[in-house]
Amino acid sequence: MEAQKKCLECERSVFGRANKKFCPYGCRNAYNNKNKTAATNYIRNVNNLVAKNRQILLAFNPSGKAKKHRDQLLKKGLDLENFTHIYATKTETNTDFVTTML
C-alpha cells in the first residue's frame, strides 16, 4: 500500500494523478509565489537602482555627452555599485559610467 501524498503547500491529502503535488485550493500558486519572491525582489531592486542611475545621468546629460565631476553625481544619489557597463576613454584617465535599462 502506497503512502498518502500531501500537498507541498498546505499538507492536505492529495488525490488524483500519481504525480500530482498540490491540492486544488490555489496552493500551487501560493507555493510558487513564496519560492520565487526572493529572486523577483532582487531583480526588481537592481532594476530600480539602475533606472534611478539612468535618470540622474540623463538629467546631467540631455544632449548625449557631458562631463560632470564625480562628486556632483554622488551628491544627486548615483549608485556606483549598480551600472550596466563602464566605458574607458582613450586617455583612460577618466571613466564614464553608462547605465541602460535592463
Image (cartoon, rainbow, N blue to C red):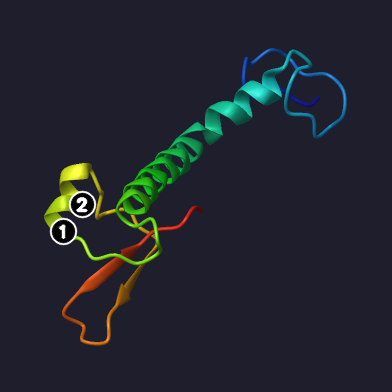
**Residue designated by label 1:** 70
Does the image show residue 7? no
Q: Quadrant of residue 66?
A: bottom left
Label 2 and label 1: CA atoms lie apart by 5 Å
Q: Looking at the picture, how far across and down is residue 2, in whole percent? A: 78, 26
> Quarter holding the N terminus?
top right
39 or 63, nearer to the observer: 63
User: Looking at the image, do the residues carrying marks 2 and 1 touch, with CB atoms under 8 Å apart?
Assistant: yes
Q: Residue furthest left?
A: 71
- Residue at image coords 84%, 32%: 18
Residue type (three-letter) at the residue carrying disc 2:
Leu
Q: Looking at the picture, how far across and down is residue 14, in whole percent? A: 77, 18
Q: Looking at the picture, how far across and down is residue 70, in whole percent? A: 16, 58
- Residue at image coords 68%, 24%: 29
- Residue at image coords 20%, 52%: 73
Q: Classify 62 as above or below 76.
A: below
How dense is the environment of label 1, judged by Cα within 10 Å: few (below 14), some, or many (20 and up)? Answer: few
Say the numbered circle drawn on residue 73: 2
